[in-house]
Image (cartoon, rainbow, N blue to C red):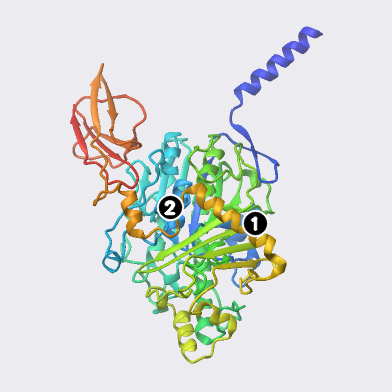
Amino acid sequence: MKFLQFLLIVCISFVGCQSKVKSKVKTSKDAILELPDRPNILWLVTEDMGAYIPPFGDSTVATPNLSRLAREGVVYSNLYSTSGVCAPSRAAIATGLYPSSFGANHMRVNSYTKERGLPAYEAVPPSEVKMISEWMRRAGYYCTNNYKTDYQFREPVTAWDENSPYAHWRNRKENQPFFAVFNFTETHESGLFEPYGFREIETRLYHAGDKTYKWKNFGESHANNRMSEEETPIHLPKGTKFNIPPYLPDTEKTRRDMWKLYNNIAEMDKQVGAVLKQLEDDGLLENTIIFFYGDHGGPLPREKRLIYDSGLNTPMIIRFPKKLQAGTKDDQLISFVDFAPTLLSLISEEPKPYMQGQAFIGPFKAQERDYIHAAADRFDAETDVIRAVRDKQFKYIRNYRPEQGYYLPIEYRERIPTMRELLRLKDMGKLNEFQMQWFRENKPKEELFDCSADPFELNNLANNPNYQDKLKEMNMEMDKWLKTIGDNPELPESALIEILWNGNDTQPVTSAPIITTKNGKVTISCDTDGASIGYRINTNQAKPLKVWEVYQEPFKLPENSKLEVQAHRIGFKPSNTAVLLN
């Protein structure tokens, strides 16, 4: 009998060792999710997205695809971007670093150079930093981006297997796990501009992988690439009533923009549905973790670019395979800097030591964070300096230029009819006290808001004696954070560039790759510390390869082939492409 028991234990242990398709993954509630060891990961990313959808309590317009995703997944109510605008926020997502820690917080680093009297530049993270997609590629994932980048630095050739309007998981090797990003532009603030109309390029999502498909106006800006208003699909009756935020005037212009906002969301939901259908059609739904989120808060005036919750808070839904934890809500605080470490955690890899965020799910899930942090600096040609910290109830804001008003005259934003309406009514003296707060000629050095009681952040408690302990706590947390990440808010942008360029007058350049052959194998190195090395091999001169592989170890080079190599440290200029003919 003892022998049979021993044999049974051995058999069970053997079967357990052979079954490596599942891993136990902790969620934020410490429940156990049994997920594939190497799940596919799909990111559905929309732009300028506040909590204007039914899963987050706003039923103004139906979003059947997002609502289904929420029913089958987990709703995360406390996701915050690191900035109220896209490029700094996307820099945080791509690296796991706070943008203000490595020169990525000005919007954008390579624009408005003449107005600033400064050169265009790129953010320069520490040498060990790689884009999260490169870490995923190194782990064997097929990584695609369709197709917005905007990281505040040029992505190395090692970042993606595909980065184009055609990028899709369908082009991967058989059974290769994938990390695929689809970016939806319908909800961008430019969708509120006049004349109003949808961007025709969005139809690419219905032709995924079909590189023969052609569309109109590809490559034009958000504002110009549009159908006419007559061609625009209508998802919401034009007489719909809206809950106008108290910081906006309740006028015909505002209601019209609110209608545009919700109609854009409904069209985006349709696009989300198209991608989800492709996933289901391919039989991949139950082997894929699906994320939906926005790149920061809403598109309206006093939302985008500001670090009130209206500019930072964006909805997130995660659907796990087999609808695990379906229909639940998770209120833990999550920052965009947490995305990169969480991706690694989900594929059972430990987050990199340099990452300033932390995993919020997966086997390397950290203890729930107590605070999220954000920063606002230059937007286009206009500059301010603001930092913020928030816990689950209170928001603390520190204004480094209290002598300067909140409102920045940003030409791009003033194309929104509601923004022009605000300015018109201000000049007429017809804005109420809440609407006028944004147009004050100066601002307090410190602000404190109870976001539970005052979700629109209109009642500053910083001078209220009942909240001095909370003010002190948040002030200390702010100082701690700034010191930890090395953020000097009062550093002029010219001095920042000097630091990023190591005191030189020009952007640093990645050293040329060094190619050596020994015993029939090719070895590649680069003298620039931290440079990523990409290579591609062409065995058919009539059909050049476009995909760059990530160099990790020596390899054999086929006969009669052409090897191309490029080295690139993030924030530096890439090296010239080196060529070796065999």
Q: Quadrant of residue 193?
A: bottom left
Q: On the image, which quarter does residue 462 sit in?
A: bottom right
- Of the numbered discs in the image, which one, if any, rests on residue 249? none
Residue 473 has which mark? Answer: 1
227 with respect to 20 (left or right) = left
Where, by quadrant of the figure, is residue 113 drawn?
bottom left
Of 534 and 509, the residue lying toward us? 509
Residue 32 to residue 105: above or below: above
Residue under pointer 2:
91
Q: Is residue 19 above or below residue 199?
A: above
Using the image, determine if residue 293 lies above or below residue 529.
below
Q: Is residue 349 visible?
A: yes
Number of other residues with Cα within 10 Å of mark 1, as a class: few under 14, some 14 to 19, many 20 or more: few
Q: Which class describes the residues within 10 Å of circle 2: few (<14), some (14-19), or many (20+)?
A: many
Q: Is any atom of residue 77 visible in this view? A: no
Quadrant housing the C terminus: top left
- Residue 268 x %, y %: 50, 64
Quadrant of the rendering where the N terminus is positioned: top right
Q: Nearer the viewer, mark 2 or mark 1?
A: 1
Q: Amino acid at mark 1?
A: Glu
Q: Position of residue 302 (x, y in %)?
A: 51, 73
Q: Is residue 389 left or right of residue 487?
A: right
Residue under the point 61% across and 43% down: 361
Circle nearer the N terminus (2, 1): 2
Q: Residue furthest bottom?
A: 428
Q: Name the spot of residue 417 as percent of width and height, x first.
A: 45, 81
The front one of 1 and 153 is 153
In the foreground, 548 or 530: 530
- Residue 373 horizontal side relative to residue 160, left or right: right
Image position, residue 568 (x, y; %): 30, 41
Task: Give me the C-alpha separation between circle 2 and circle 1.
Answer: 28 Å
Label 1's element? helix
